[in-house]
């Protein structure tokens, strides 16, 4: 597997362990919002089966102030391909028709991790399109934002709409401003 700096890992460790638990045994994984591919490289470690399919969607050209993220994500996908995974990378918005069509051709998925655009309308679009093609769908950042500057973040709003479903679970590590949730 590819070496990566642990500082690139932006998840709460306890919450990410819960995410790995939810993904364990998956034969196919879709991740929306991959940055360096660090989470993806960890998620594939809990996969099972022979035909392991991995699909990643992320914005090009180092969004969010990470100028080398595209290069590192491409390297992670290349490493997975060399390791025998059926790995695919789509650079662009997860809501773009061309990306949606291409990803749909690769579905369905056992596990989808939605950690892309955190604005309510965007995460809801991801849920409505990619959710039906997945057995389990996990979300990151289900807590309301702590600072007024992040008021546009709306994963928590979508989670509030979904959390009463019988197949909905969540985990928030004590003191964490993020939290993770899963449907399915």
Image: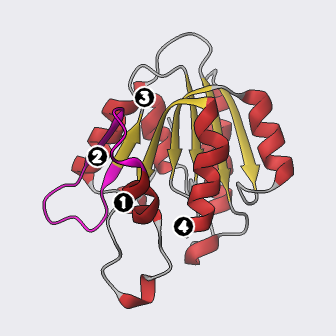
Q: Which of 65 and 4 is in front in this view?
A: 65
Region of the chain picked out in magenta, as a range: 162-180
Closer to the N terminus: mark 2 or mark 4?
4
Residue 3 in sight here: no
- Where residue 145 sits in the image (x, y, percent)? 35, 76
Q: Which mark is residue 170?
A: 2
Answer with left or right where residue 182 lies relative to residue 26.
Answer: left
Q: Earlier in the sequence, mark 1 or mark 2?
A: 1
Q: What element carries label 1?
A: loop
Residue projecting furthest to the bottom: 148
Kindly check if marks 1 and 2 are in contact, taking CB atoms under 8 A apart as contact: yes
Whichever of callouts 4 and 3 sits on the residue coming sooner in the sequence is 3
Q: Mark 1 points at which residue?
A: 142
C-alpha distance separating marks 2 and 4: 18 Å
Residue 103, magenta (yes or no): no
Neighbor class of circle 4 (other Cα within 10 Å; few <14, some 14-19, many 20+) is some
Q: Determine which of the numbered discs, if any, sits on residue 45 in the image.
A: 3
Tell me the residue that label 4 is attached to.
120
Q: Residue 171: horizontal and vertical position, in percent?
A: 24, 48
Q: What element carries label 4?
A: helix
Q: Could you tell me how far apart the alpha carbons at marks 2 and 3 are, in whole angstroms?
A: 22 Å
Secondary structure beneath dot 2 equals: strand
Main SS of the magenta segment? loop
Q: Nearer the viewer, residue 120 or 113?
A: 120
């Amino acid at each position: 597997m590819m070496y990566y700096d642990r500082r690139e890992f932006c998840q709460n460790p306890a919450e990410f362990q819960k995410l790995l638990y939810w993904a364990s045994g998956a034969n196919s994984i879709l991740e929306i919002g991959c940055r360096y591919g660090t989470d993806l490289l960890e998620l594939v470690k809990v996969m099972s089966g022979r035909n392991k399919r991995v699909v990643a969607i992320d914005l090009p050209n180092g969004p969010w102030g990470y100028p080398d993220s595209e290069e590192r994500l491409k390297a992670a996908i290349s490493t997975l391909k060399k390791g025998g995974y059926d790995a695919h990378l789509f650079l662009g918005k997860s809501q773009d028709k061309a990306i949606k069509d291409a990803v749909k051709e690769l579905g369905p998925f056992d596990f989808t991790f939605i950690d892309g655009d955190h604005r309510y309308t965007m995460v809801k679009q991801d849920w409505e399109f990619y959710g039906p093609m997945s057995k389990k769908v996990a979300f990151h950042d289900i807590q309301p934002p702590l600072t007024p500057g992040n008021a546009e973040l709306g994963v928590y709003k979508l989670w509030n709409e979904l959390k009463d479903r019988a197949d909905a679970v969540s985990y928030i590590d004590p003191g964490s401003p993020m939290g993770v949730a899963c449907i399915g």
